[in-house]
Image (cartoon, helix red, strand yellow):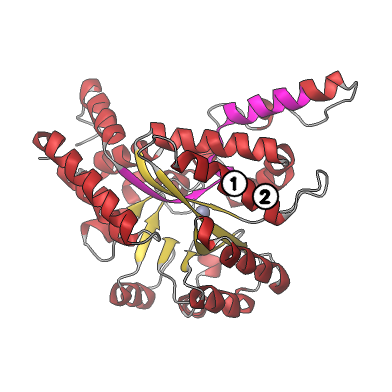
């Protein structure tokens, strides 16, 4: 569909199609997926509770800190937003449970049928919450939601932050293996791409792989850290999937093709954070998907920050790369083979997509 020629009604028909389409989300940071409205509700509760005890609650209202409609966060402004603000607001079991539930409900309402959330294990000194208690609170919310009547099933990926010390990274791997039976399916390398010593994490990812966990890495986000040797070092971790994959020399592109590694591509995030030069139509999605170079999965990254739900990411690629409904279906369906959960989950998704195609097949032209 050509955006310039599309009418208002064609645009809303596309949005509706994309919302109903069963979708697979594989790159969503839990904290970054919390909406401002949800943060505001948590803030109100905390403020009232403090007032009742005659205390002053000094954290500013999320609506003021993260104004409605503001999406122009970049790598400089995004990370402090999390470390200085959101982590201070969601810092006990009650708020972590509440916000995780709200995130799950949002993805479910948007037509997501399979979700892999990711989070960095963290402790909260001011409330005494340990990393294990944090992960348990998240997993309990996920598992409660999974046993509800919802079609959507969710799994968890634990992230190592680039700024972590080797000891901290080891703690994250220990937690990932400890909670494998509860729904942790993989580990990730994330965080400010300009920080940290990635070489020090090689043994941790080897250990995760040996334990049967899958590996995904943030990869080639900024030109400065995308020297061929850095990227080859990350590839030596044997990732099952890579995300962003923006600043990639041709030699590495060839390597990714050879390995047929799955790519988690985040359109709105990359455009709003100015991680690439240009606009939606210049996104490297076009090259990877339309030239069928590697399996591609559309993802949101931080829907709470960039305000574009997964259905809207599908609508964006339809509009800017002229994809048909059949191509959108195929794009979503092809994500099944790249998920980190096992055969039972893949079979469940196969049957969901098959049933949807039978029902809505007439639209798939
Ligand atoms: Zn990310």
Residue range highlighted in magenta? 23-47
Helix, strand or loop under label 1:
helix
Looking at the image, can residue 208 be seen? yes
Helix, strand or loop under label 2:
helix
Q: Percent from the top left, x then y, of residue 36?
A: 59, 30
Quarter of the image with the N terminus in it: top left
| CB under 8 Å between discs 2 and 1 | yes
Taking the spot 50% from the left edge, 65% from the top edge, the residue there is 223
Taking the spot 27% from the left edge, 33% from the top edge, the residue there is 20
The residue that label 2 is drawn on is: 134
Q: Is residue 18 left or right of residue 39?
A: left
Give residue 138's mark: 1
In the depicted structure, whether residue 201 falls above or below residue 89? below
Looking at the image, can residue 244 be seen? no
Magenta stretch contains residue 45: yes
Q: Say few, some or many: other residues with alpha carbon within 10 Å of mark 1 (under 14 / 14 to 19 / 20 or more).
A: many
In the depicted structure, whether residue 224 falls above or below residue 229? above
Magenta stretch contains residue 171: no
Quarter of the image with the C terminus in it: top left
Q: Give how far apart the Cα atoms at labels 2 and 1 are.
A: 6 Å
In the depicted structure, whether residue 184 falls above or below residue 359? below
The one of 319 and 351 positioned closer to us in this rendering: 351
Give residue 232's mark: none
């Amino acid at each position: 569909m050509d955006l310039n020629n599309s009418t208002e009604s064609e645009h809303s028909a596309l949005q509706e199609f994309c919302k109903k389409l069963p979708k697979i989300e594989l790159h969503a940071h839990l904290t970054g997926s919390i909406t401002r409205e949800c943060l505001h509700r948590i803030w109100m509760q905390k403020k009232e509770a403090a007032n009742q005890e005659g205390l002053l609650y000094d954290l500013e209202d999320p609506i003021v800190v993260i104004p409605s409609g503001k999406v122009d966060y970049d790598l400089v402004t995004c990370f402090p937003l999390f470390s200085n603000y959101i982590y201070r607001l969601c810092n006990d079991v009650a708020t972590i449970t509440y916000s995780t539930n709200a995130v799950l409900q949002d993805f479910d309402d948007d037509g997501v049928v399979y979700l892999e959330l990711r989070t960095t294990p963290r402790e909260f000194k001011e409330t005494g919450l340990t990393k294990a208690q944090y992960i348990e609170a998240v997993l309990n919310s996920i598992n409660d939601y999974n046993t509800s009547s919802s079609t959507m099933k969710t799994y968890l990926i634990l992230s190592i932050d680039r700024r972590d010390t080797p000891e901290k990274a080891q703690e994250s791997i220990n937690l990932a293996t400890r909670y494998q039976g509860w729904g942790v399916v993989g580990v990730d390398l994330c965080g400010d791409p300009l920080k940290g010593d990635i070489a020090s994490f090689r043994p941790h990812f080897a250990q995760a792989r040996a334990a049967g966990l899958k590996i995904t890495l943030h990869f080639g986000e900024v030109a400065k850290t995308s020297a061929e040797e850095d990227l080859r070092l990350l590839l030596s971790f044997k990732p099952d999937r890579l995300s962003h994959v923006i600043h990639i020399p041709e030699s590495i592109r060839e390597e990714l093709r050879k390995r047929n590694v799955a790519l988690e591509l985040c359109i709105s995030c990359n455009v709003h954070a100015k991680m690439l030069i240009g606009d939606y139509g210049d996104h490297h999605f076009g090259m990877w998907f339309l030239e069928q170079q590697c399996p591609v999965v559309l993802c949101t990254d931080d829907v709470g920050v960039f305000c574009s739900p997964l259905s809207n990411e599908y609508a964006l690629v339809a509009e800017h790369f002229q994809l048909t409904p059949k191509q959108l279906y195929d794009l979503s369906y092809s994500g099944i083979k790249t998920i980190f959960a096992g055969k039972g989950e893949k079979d469940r998704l196969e049957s969901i997509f098959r049933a949807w195609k039978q029902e809505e097949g007439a639209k798939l032209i």
